[in-house]
Amino acid sequence: DTGVSQNPRHKITKRGQNVTFRCDPISEHNRLYWYRQTLGQGPEFLTYFQNEAQLEKSRLLSDRFSAERPKGSFSTLEIQRTEQGDSAMYLCASSRESPEQYFGPGTRLTVT
Amino acid sequence: AQTVTQSQPEMSVQEAETVTLSCTYDTSESDYYLFWYKQPPSRQMILVIRQEAYKQQNATENRFSVNFQKAAKSFSLKISDSQLGDAAMYFCAYLFNQGGKLIFGQGTELSVKP
């Protein structure tokens, strides 16, 4: 296993711009999760997929956020019209048929 | 709603000594999973140990062990023979069902003194 990968690792954007992050899960992991982590806090759940189906979305996921996993492999998380409050680390995790979730290195978003 | 609480924002331990990190949680479920994750300064979250609620035996992974008290809803992590590489943020997490979301505590920052 090569582990969960996320790109880009860092993103700086101006308020109002759209950004898109990508997550590649561990091969053959059918579940994929997105979390958001602000400085000094634990990660907060955003959404998760089983294969290509989005099964749960948090109330944190406003209408400016959208996530997709079109072929049940990689996933993208898009934030439209970014706000300063969106600045955070966005973590992706994946799992197979087990409770353990394996995390990627995260994408750090800074909105100026 | 399920919640996870870590009441120790920071802890410190001398190298080679033992330290215990505390975690409490609230749930009305009887079957669930509990985890400890480690997040070093590089920020990649690493799974340390897992406990199934239906198991009475406490989980152990090398120098890491837990004290799971189901009735008290307590789940502490003991690190024995602490090493410099153990310095990190440690998060306690709860999972209700296999495919669901993890609920994390606020974290405990552990420093290890040489």
Image (cartoon, grey):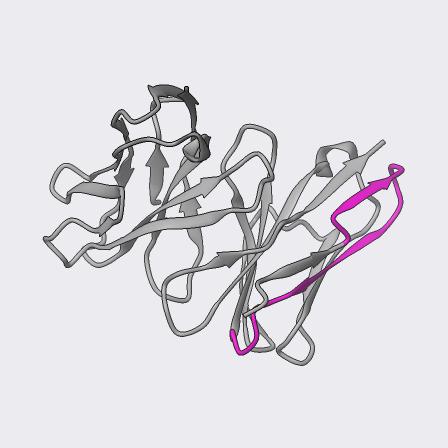
Q: Position of residue B62 (x, y in %)?
A: 26, 48
In which quadrant of the rendered image does the C terminus of chain A lie? top right
Q: Quick one: B107 or B39, which is closer to the camera?
A: B39
Q: Horizontally, is A47 left or right of B1 in the view?
A: right
Q: Quick one: B85 or B58, which is closer to the camera?
A: B85
Q: Horizontally, is A20 left or right of B15 in the view?
A: right
Q: Quick one: B74 or B66, which is closer to the camera?
A: B66
Identity of the residue drawn at 33% across and 63% down: B97
Answer with the quarter of the image where residue B105 lies: top left
Q: Horizontally, is B23 left or right of B74 in the view?
A: right
User: Magenta segment, which residues?
Assistant: A8-29
Identity of the residue drawn at 60% across and 39% down: B42
Q: Where is residue B9 in the image (x, y as percent from the top left)?
A: 41, 22
- The answer to if B17 sits in the magenta stretch is no
Q: In this view, does B83 lie above or below A4?
A: above
Answer with the quarter of the image where residue A5 lies: bottom right
- The answer to if A26 sits in the magenta stretch is yes
Identity of the residue drawn at 85% across and 50% down: A18
Q: Where is residue B26 in the image (x, y as percent from the top left)?
A: 27, 40
Count of labels shown? 0
Q: Quick one: B72 or B20, which is closer to the camera?
A: B20
Answer with the quarter of the image where residue B73 lies: top left
Identity of the residue drawn at 22% across and 42% down: B66
Q: Position of residue A87 (x, y in %)?
A: 72, 36
